[in-house]
Amino acid sequence: DQSRRQVQTMAGYGLPQAQIALLIGISEPTLRKHYAHDLDLGEARATLAVSQTLFNRATKGNDLGAAIFWMKARAGWREKAPDAVVKHS
């Protein structure tokens, strides 16, 4: 159980699998074979935590940057370059 929590935590922090394997003392193929679910779960939990924070900052009205990022990433907003002005002589 402790090694599974460690793998989940390290995966959530974004450590490469090679480093996780090194830190717990196994090969990368063994890590993927026995800890695949924990690697995925760690990444998913980290993404959940960051997305909750971003959502809260965007919806509480105190972080315009978070709100803009959310709208671009989730609602398809994009920055549009101004239309070119064509001069006719």
Image: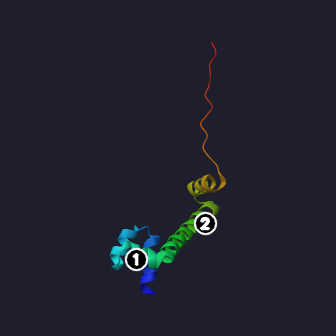
Q: In this orientation, which residue lies closer to the viewer: 37 or 54?
A: 37
Mark 2 or 1: the one toward you: 1
Residue that badge 2 annotates: 56
Residue 34: image location, x then y, percent: 45, 79
Residue 23: % across, % down: 34, 76
Mark before the other along the chain sequence, 2 or 1: 1
**Crowdedness near tag 2: few (<14), some (14–19) or many (≥20) residues, C-alpha within 10 Å:** some
Mark 2 is on which residue type? Asn
Residue at 48% x, 75% y is 36
Q: Mark 1 packing: few (<14 Cα in 10 Å), some, or many (20+)? A: few
Q: Residue at x 44, y 74 (%)?
A: 32
How many marks can you see? 2
How far from the left and from the top, in percent, is residue 54? 57, 63
6 up-or-down from 17: above or below: below
Q: CA distance from mark 2 to mark 1?
A: 38 Å
Give the residue drawn at x 54%, y 71%.
44
Q: Is residue 32 above or below residue 2?
A: above
Q: Quadrant of residue 15?
A: bottom left
The disc at residue 30 is 1
Report the quarter where the C terminus lies: top right
Q: Residue at x 54, y 73 (%)?
A: 45
